[in-house]
Image: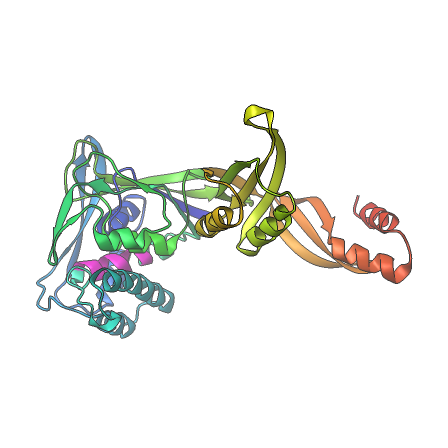
Amino acid sequence: MQVAYFDCFSGISGDMIVGSLLDAGLDFDELDAEIKKLGLGPVEIRASKVVKQNIASTQFSVVFEEQKHHRHLKDLNVLVENTPVDQDIKEKAKEVFLKIAVAEAKIHNMPLDKVHFHEIGAIDTIVDVVAALTGFKKLGIEKVFCSRLNVGSGFVTFSHGKFPVPAPATAEILKGIPSYSTDSRGELVTPTGAAIITSIASDFGDMPAMITHSIGYGAGTKDFGHPNVLRLYLGEMKHEEDADSVYVLETNIDDMNPQFYDHVIERLYGEGALEVFITNIQMKKNRPGIKLTILSAPDAKDRLLKIIFRETTSIGVRIRQESREILKREIKTISTPYGEVQAKFSYYEGEPVNMKVEYDDLKRLSSETGQSIKNISSGIYKLYE
């Protein structure tokens, strides 16, 4: 699987994404041909080599004479839709535009169709979005991972006024995404960069296990006390297995009725917990207690925290992010001397390593045949030894 990992130690923006893709091997002439399909008039894209704090990188820019400064969401959608650009790129571009529009509408408390896109409406931002999406497709990238986002600090001035970093729209888009701030004075994550990366990245955290084939650096326009570049790793997953990251939520409880755990665990699984388990521990004053541990996908973390605080007596939860590798899995219906069952097969480097029959099917066959579930299970597994 071809994958990409963005290392955002100096934030991320639309032009930095495109610059990193070009630096990592995207053909400029092919990209230029695709941008010309937009029919934007006298618009020119450029890519030049620059050095940022002794790191050679590619700076992507758009040269044009902008006439219309205010655009609405429908204007952007119509502009992109009425072009021969690939349909999947059109749909993803409209998703990115919508993400920014929703954030701006909420920040300014106005209907979605009334939002004026002062920055997003500019030609260079439209080009950045389509160029980035085109780059992912041209390079054959199937999955995108991203680090935590350094948003910078201080203030930034837009057409609406002066705002703290990250800009309100950027902060809105980054809700639920791991980010942090440093003493770098300036805007490191732009609304366009935030909208693109949150639309295409499947996970935010540590770099997954991958074999790197090329590394690209996309240059930012400003200079700081560190290299203002976006680093991009392109390569393959180490194995066919999927790699991702999970949040581990843990809390110690010593004052809750044990009968409540059944209800709590049921609620946690109902809201998307990957795993829930309890461990007997000894707490302060030699009191016996329970450590409740939940494994959560990034998008379920906040929902699970709400359940913990509402349904248990916990007053604090430890949270950490961990990476994991997952075997490729496949559910098959298999025929056995006892009847048909569903079985999960797991593969490592293409070879089957585990097989597990669904427990409910074992119960059903035991009831139907009158044989013990132990003998049925043993007989089925012997067939696959």
Q: Colour scheme used in the picture? A: rainbow
Q: Is residue 350 left or right of residue 237?
A: right
Observer-nearest residue: 334 or 217?
334
Observer-nearest residue: 166 or 218?
166
Res. 193 in view = no
Instruction: Give above or below for 248 relative to 124.
Output: above
Task: Report the quarter where the C terminus lies.
Answer: top right
Q: Residue 65, located in which quarter of the rendered image?
A: bottom left
The residue shown at (75%, 57%) is 360
Query: Where in the figure is residue 329, as x and y percent of width and height?
Result: 62, 50
Q: Residue 253, located in which quarter of the rendered image?
A: top right
Q: Is residue 221 left or right of residue 251?
A: left
The residue shown at (31%, 68%) is 85
Res. 139 in view = yes
Query: Where in the figure is residue 96, as x and y percent of width and height?
Result: 31, 61
Query: Where in the figure is residue 337, as x and y percent of width and height?
Result: 87, 57
The residue shown at (56%, 48%) is 274
Question: Does the stretch in magenta take in 233?
Answer: no
Q: Residue 55, located in which quarter of the rendered image?
A: top left
Q: Which residues are magenta?
A: 124-133
The residue shown at (20%, 58%) is 125
Q: How many numbered marks have been drawn onto this rendered protein structure?
A: 0
Q: Is residue 1 left or right of residue 24?
A: right
| Residue that lies at the very extreme toward the right in this rendered image | 370
Q: Is residue 234 left or right of residue 132?
A: right
Instruction: Give above or below for 42 relative to 141.
Output: below
Observer-nearest residue: 127 or 305?
305
Magenta stretch prevailing secondary structure: helix
Observer-nearest residue: 380 or 51?
380
Query: Where in the figure is residue 225, as x and y percent of width and height?
Result: 17, 31
